[in-house]
Image (spheres, rainbow, N blue to C red):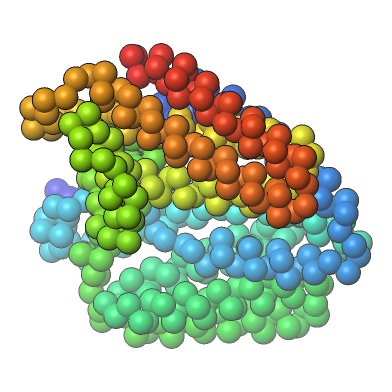
Amino acid sequence: MFNENKLWRDRAGGRMKDLGRYLRYIFNGHIVIVLLFLIGTAAFYYQEWIKTLSPNFPAALVIAILIGIIVTYSPVYNFLLEADKVFLLPLEERLKGYFLRSGFASLVFQGYILLLVLAVLMPINAHVSDNGFGSFIPFLLVLLLIKAWNLAANWKIQFYVETSVQRWDFLVRYLINTVFTYLMFKQANLFILIVIGIIMVFYYYSFHIRTTKMGLKWDLLIDAEEKRMASFYRLANLFTDVPKLKDTVKRRKYLDLFIGKIPFLQEKTYLYLFARTFLRSSDYLGLFVRLTVIGSLAIYFISFGIGQLVLTILFVYLTGFQLLPLWNHHQNKLWVDLYPVSQRDKTVSFHFLLMMILVVQSCIFALLILIKGEWFYSLLVLGAGLVFSYLFVYFYSKGRLKK
């Protein structure tokens, strides 16, 4: 006898157990200390930045744009597996409760993210308006209702195969969410907000009617779920081996100019291998780009003075620490062991590449500070970044790679 409640409990429980196992590795050791320092530093400079805002600062518009993104992106975590397209397809009509529970679980998780984002943005609104923090709870409750609407609407859009329908839906919902949030923070007339709410209801109802006779697109649902889990597994793989992770490699021909500068020598074999792996693998190059962009924005817009130095060291550490798995990237490939290259050459090559990556990142941070006109702190950040990179690569990383 098929029991959809038991199926959902098993799937959701297994997924939570899987996530919890890897989260213990992610939030363990030095990374927690670094994150605490990073959050503390960002919070301090964020408060200092808020104090500089004038009463004319468009707080409602900025908050609406950011909140609009959070509430519009509303995937339903369905916990489906590859085999479900065969074994659960005949039971599609009996899975309404299963997907309803998945939608509620998605609302709880994404609602928590929405709570954190709103808590971060509310001080801006409190600084430039007379509302203070008294409207936090009412705003949160309304935004949770909007989030639920977005989850329901996004689920109905999943019945369409055409990507153009999904793109237009995302754009329309984002505009509705942003306008509603903006008017809410501007304390617009309640009648206007109710009208927009009615439009939301009719928007969902129109897709509900159109998809009544449509079937679930199992391939799309399973593919979306696998992509979400692959993103998490790539993050977890930076801290421990993840057997379920599938490597993603891209050609990136435009980056071959960096590979071409490596001498064609036997002792440079591993340097070539590590460099090509770094440039072609989305895990490593994407990580470097993301951390560099986030660090650049934090250093340029949020911090000042000695805080720029602290953030530089933190982001260089985060980058270096999360690039250490590159050392073992090819450990399960037997053909690598056939290289007539000594272990020392491998170690030297890895340290050299890691040092170059961290030096480039330090130079980018220093250049941004120089653009701000703070030449003294620019030199200080550059020197500190180079020294810290050297200590991290040739002292700290050696101990980590031996474990």
Percent x, y of residue 154: 42, 70
What residue do we see at 64% from left, 49% from top?
367
Percent x, y of residue 325: 34, 31
Quadrant where the C terminus is found in the figure: top left
On the image, which quarter does residue 397 sit in? top left
In the figure, 323 relative to 170: above or below? above
Front residue (pair 373, 326): 373
Question: Is 270 placed left or right of 204 in the picture?
Answer: left
- Residue 229 in sight in this render: no
On the image, which quarter does residue 87 sit in? bottom left
What residue do we see at 40% from left, 59% from top?
76
What residue do we see at 65% from left, 68% from top?
65
On the image, which quarter does residue 125 sit in? bottom right
In the figure, 66 relative to 45: above or below? below
- Residue 278 in sight in this render: yes
Percent x, y of residue 401: 35, 19
